[in-house]
Image: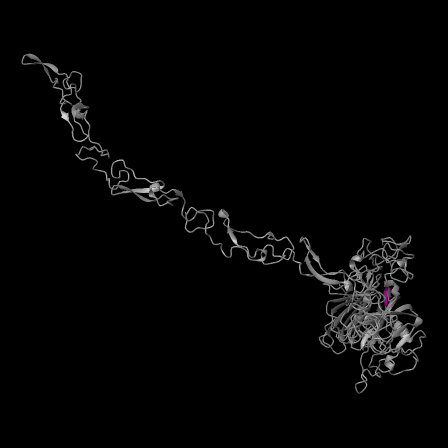
Amino acid sequence: SCSFGTIMCSGGALMCAGGTGPTSESCNSVDDDCDGSVDEGNPGGGASCGSSTGSCTQGTQTCLGGALQCTGGTGPSPESCNMADDDCDMSTDEDFDFMNDRNNCGGCGTVCSFPNASAGCSGGSCVFLGCDPGFVDVDGDPMNGCEYMCSFAGAEACNGRDDDCDMAVDESLTPPATFCNANGVCAGTSATCGGMSGWTCSYPATYETPESTCDSLDNDCDGAVDEAFPTVGNACANGVGECRRTGSIVCNGPGTGTTCNAPPAGAPGVESCNGLDDDCDGSLDEGGLGTWVPITGPFGTSYMMAYEASRPDATSFSTGSMSHRACSSPNRQPWTNLTQPEAEAACAAAGGRLCTEQEWQTGCESTTTMCDWSYASSCSTYQSMVCNDVNYDFDPGTPGDQNGMLATASLPMCYAGWSGGDRIYDMSGNAEEWTAARQPGINPLRGGSNNDTSGGTRCDFDFIVADDTIRLPTVGFRCCRSTPLTCDNGVFDGDETDLDCGGSCDGCVDGASCMLGSDCTSGICSGGICQVPTCSDGVTNGGETDTDCGGATACPRCPTGDSCGVDADCASGSCLGGVCRDFSCTTVFGTDGYGYVGCEDTPAVLPCDDIRSTGTATGVSDDGTATVSIGFSFDFYGTAYTGLTVQANGAVTFETGGIGFGNTCLPKGGNPDVLIAPFWDDLNPSNGGSEVYYQTLGSAPNRRFVVQWSTEHYNSTPSRADVRMVLREGSNDIDVCYVDTDFGNASFDFGLSATAGISDPAVDTLQYSCGGAVLTNGLLLEYHHP
């Protein structure tokens, strides 16, 4: 604490002024006496300090760190339970509750505890408060605590655990009533407790899932029996046709599948025409069944049904309902009330066809060809009651003369006799019979019916015809065929070259035996074998439309003029009228026997020249004619012409003379009748401004001759028509252009009263229209020469 001063002269003496000198040492961490030591000698200390109560003892005051502190004694500490006054407050263990403190219950250090349980202190004694989670006191003795490890879950359940902690697992449980499946083989099974697996059902050994055994049991207990075998119980059979024996699908012995329990198939019989598969071959009434009689005439030898055709399931009193073929059987109701095309189809299904009129009449007239009726005797004289005609009393028990249909061959003397005792029944009367068409839609009816007079039942009566739509309950049919029945009998016999083919039978298939090309469907027999058709065998076969060409084959397309079926058959890509052409046609309106093909079109531009300003006026008057030169040779129906006659009434003829104003349908009767009629009607070139022109245009060999009618109708129509005809050199084709056919009078417009077509009655006719407003503006008709 000392500091230097300054020596000064004061009062005549030297003295130290301004310095600090040493003082007595104090307890203040300062060197008060300036001796180089701090607080040495315990300044102010040495006195006793602190408490001597309880566990405390007094210490001595000591200068430490510049302050007096009590050192060396024992001070108070927090009270502990140790029977001592630790906090020196003159009270011992006063902070502890010996009545309720579980760690010092009734005295220090007495800790309350029970195994696996909670403990407490009450009134200075240890008490049991309850088991720890997961433990149970099963013996009720709190002293040993909770000795059983268990988590209480409530009532006992089936789970492999002691849910109610009674030291028993899954005890005294009642199985759930509906736990186990009660269907099928599972019925009667009760649930059992399987511990940790829960309730289980011990099903019998027949239980399986999925079901795979066929045993008439519900093995998978789903309420369905043998569902893996869905056909069980279905109907089944062994054999076909009349050999068929029926049963049902059942499980086989091992239960691995199914089997049919039907009896073995029966033995096949002989096929007959009865709507049944008698020979058990899967086919119904196949072959030329029934009785067919060989007849001979100008046509050669044919085979005719001995009986009027009947349905396969017909009986003596019922016509039946089956229609898959015609049968020739006695004592059957005839098949009537069908159209001629239906009869033709029924014959075809029987391996035959409808008889031609010549065949039918020959069969009726018997071997002598002299019979007028199909009577067994005296066949040239009418006899009532021999055949079923109008005079035969169908029902003698009913008053009057009753007419009706009899079963076939009911009248024993109503037949035409043939060689070897063969008989053809009921050709006079009973059912009138369809025969082959004379031409499309014209179908003759022969033999008369049960309500016809004697004249109508004659063999030669051919007056009655009907179209393809007529069906009557008195009209039936019988069939003919060109080949003998041996061709259908499944036996190699007759003049066949192979089984049921060749010779008099139909041609044989490729690979079958043959002697001639006619024995084969291919038309080629080589080395005694029918050959496969080729595109170079010189025969139309194998689907070809002409010799070695056309058809759905690999053969070349056919040249112009050959036969075809569709455009693709032709090299030109145009098949018209069954012949390959070198032209195409939008719509074919007709063909004729000579070979002309008629086409109609409505092109954007009509290909006929307008020659009103360049052509020569004919100057023809009403109903007049003008004979002119064509300018080249033109072939019409096989005759070459170099000139023609222009008719005022809308036609040209290749003969002289007028055709008149009264048009008819083609062919026209009387000369001139070799003609082209673009618009044959009552036209009048004499009416104001009307005229008919002609002109030859172009150069050889492609010249064209044009005639143009620019004329009014005779009946004072207000407008002129414009119709043009073009004859083409080389092709000999004819074009007719209808530029304007509107006269302004609905009675004559658009050809309503006109005829259009071409005709040479000695050869053929191709007519487009005869009346009808079909010759409309913009129409083009083309008549293509063959």
- Could you tell me residue 452's position as x and y percent? 83, 81
Magenta range is 629-633
**Where 396 falls versus 577 (above or below)?**
below
Q: Which residue ends up furthest to the right in the rendered image?
A: 368
**Where 87 falls versus 720 (above or below)?**
above
Q: Seen in the image, is 293 located left or right of residue 245?
A: right
Please tell me which residue lies in front, 56 or 623.
56
Q: Seen in the image, is 587 located left or right of residue 81?
A: right
Look at the image and say whether residue 341 sits in the magenta stretch. Answer: no
- Could you tell me residue 545's position as x and y percent? 83, 59
Can residue 624 be spotted in the picture?
no
- Colouring style: one colour
Q: Main secondary structure of the magenta part?
A: strand
When asked about the image quadrant of residue 618, the answer is bottom right
Which quadrant of the rendered structure holds the C terminus? bottom right
Can residue 411 be spotted in the picture?
yes
**Where 324 falls versus 65 (above or below)?**
below
Q: Which residue ends up furthest to the left in the rendered image?
A: 11
Which quadrant of the rendered structure holds the N terminus? top left
